[in-house]
Image: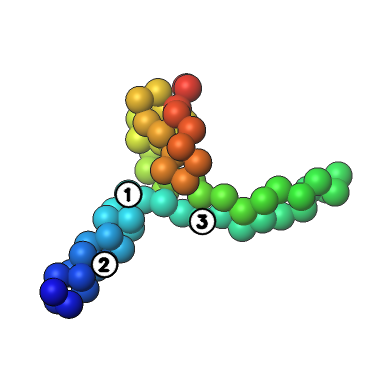
Amino acid sequence: MRPLLLLSLLFIGVSAEARGSVRTKGYTTKRGTYVAPSHRTKGNHTKVDNYSTKGNSNPYTGKKGSK
């Protein structure tokens, strides 16, 4: 049972990396507005696999794409 659990955890970690998620850092704008940290897809010269594209959804917020 234990090897199966370890294998499952490894698979989950690899599949999360394969999705191409990047964590962004929070920052403060010149006007003093704080922008919270978030996740985005890795850049790759295409828009069809972004969280905001119709048919896709953001796995962190559950929000469906609209663009």
The residue beneath circle 3 is 23
Identify the residue shown where x is 47% and y is 22%: 67
Amino acid under disc 1: Arg
Q: Is residue 33 above or below residue 57?
A: below
The residue beneath circle 2 is 9
Is residue 15 visible in the rendered image? The answer is yes
Query: Position of 47 compared to 25: left or right?
Result: left
* Precedes in sequence: disc 3 or disc 2: 2
Quarter where residue 51 is shown: top left
Q: Residues within 10 Å of mark 1 (few under 14, many from 20)?
A: few
* Precedes in sequence: disc 2 or disc 1: 2
Query: Position of 67 compared to 46: left or right?
Result: right
Is residue 47 visible in the rendered image? The answer is no
Amino acid under disc 2: Leu
Cα–Cα gap, marks 1 and 3: 13 Å
Foreground pick, 58 / 2: 2
| Residues tagged 1 and 3 counted as in contact (Cβ below 8 A) | no
The x and y percentages for residue 50 are 41, 36
The residue beneath circle 1 is 19
Identify the residue shown where x is 45% and y is 29%: 64
